[in-house]
């Protein structure tokens, strides 16, 4: 590859920014460009939209949960990934190319995420998935990172992503209470009035309750015996 590109939503966990800074220093050592692009701060854009302070143009569309037809939590249409991740990177790639030029865009999607593979929607970019070509699943990637001295590589995701699992919410609450508090405050701000474009209030959690009122306990916490352990050892299917 000629360079790496990271699209910053402006609301990543602190350990992601620490990791990014380490990557940037390493890339400088190897004279390998690591570009950071951004559409803006997703959290701030959502709050401005709630307060009707937006200046027009594209609106943030995270998949917040609201009441569905069956009375259960249903996500809103998600467009945040496209607007805050895909398009900023695509525009930057276009700017790197000469007129009529083309590029290969590599994605770090592992074998157990193969369902996330997509063909490019623009003619000047071809998608490639090297980890899948090498048959590397998540466990293989973790082993490689540990051997290379990157064993603490964090997962990139907005702090207030509605797709977080209960386990991730629990970890945030216990390990980074300041980020948990920030996210709880954001969740409450979502319901100052019906969310723009809907007649309903929205939530970060599918249970349609304020985040700090959700029972995030695991089955083990509730007395359920764990027979298999919570971490895949890479042996499934062997």
Image (cartoon, rainbow, N blue to C red):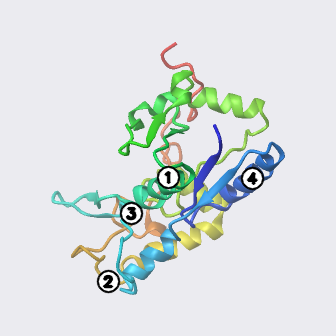
Instruction: Kindly tell me whether residue 228 is visible in this rendering.
Output: no
Do the CB atoms of the residues marked 3 and 4 lie less than 8 Å apart?
A: no
Mark 3 packing: few (<14 Cα in 10 Å), some, or many (20+)? many
Q: Which residue is mark 2?
A: 193
- For the point 52% across and 42% down, which residue is it? 220
Residue extending farthest to the front is: 99
> Marks 3 and 4, Cα distance to the nearest angstrom?
28 Å
Query: Which of the two discs, 2 and 1, labels the residue nearer the N terminus?
Result: 1
Q: Which mark is residue 24?
A: 4
Q: Is residue 19 above or below residue 135?
A: below
Query: Which of the two discs, 4 and 2, labels the residue nearer the N terminus?
Result: 4
Q: Is residue 109 above or below residue 176?
A: above
Q: Nearer the viewer, mark 4 or mark 2?
A: 4
Find residue 75 and report its image quarter: bottom left
- For the point 29% across and 61% down, which residue is it? 76
Helix, strand or loop status at disc 2: loop
Q: Which residue is mark 3?
A: 62
Residue extending farthest to the top is: 238
Residue 92, x across and y down, in percent: 53, 56
Q: Nearer the viewer, mark 3 or mark 4?
A: 4
> Marks 3 and 1, Cα distance to the nearest angstrom?
26 Å
Residue extending farthest to the left is: 69
Q: Nearer the viewer, residue 16 or 82?
A: 82
- For the point 35% across and 86% down, which residue is it? 52
Query: Which of the two discs, 1 and 4, labels the residue nearer the N terminus?
Result: 4
On screen, residue 174 versus residue 216, left or right, reads: right
Q: Which residue is mark 1?
A: 94
On screen, residue 124 versus residue 193, left or right, reads: right
Q: Nearer the viewer, residue 89 or 234?
A: 89
């Amino acid at each position: 590859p000629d360079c790496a590109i990271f699209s910053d939503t402006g609301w990543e966990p602190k350990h992601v920014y620490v990791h990014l800074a380490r990557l940037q220093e390493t890339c400088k050592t190897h004279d390998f460009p690591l570009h950071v692009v951004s559409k803006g701060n997703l959290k701030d854009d959502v709050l401005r939209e709630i307060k009707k302070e937006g200046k027009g143009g594209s609106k943030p569309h995270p998949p917040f949960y609201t009441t569905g037809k069956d009375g259960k939590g249903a996500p809103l249409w998600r467009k945040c990934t496209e607007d805050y991740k895909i398009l900023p990177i695509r525009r930057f790639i276009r700017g790197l190319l000469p007129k009529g030029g083309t590029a290969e865009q590599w994605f770090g999607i592992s074998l157990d995420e193969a369902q996330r593979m997509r063909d490019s929607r623009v003619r000047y970019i071809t998608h490639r998935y090297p980890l899948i070509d090498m048959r590397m699943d998540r466990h293989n990637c973790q082993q490689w990172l540990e051997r290379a001295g990157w064993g603490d590589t964090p997962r990139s995701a907005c702090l207030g992503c509605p797709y977080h699992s209960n386990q991730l919410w629990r970890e945030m609450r216990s390990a980074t209470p300041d980020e948990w508090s920030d996210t709880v405050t954001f969740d409450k701000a979502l319901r100052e009035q019906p969310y723009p474009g809907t007649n309903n209030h929205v939530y970060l959690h599918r249970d349609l309750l304020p985040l700090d009122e959700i029972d995030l306990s695991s089955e083990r916490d509730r007395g359920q015996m764990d027979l298999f352990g919570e971490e895949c050892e890479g042996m499934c299917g062997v």
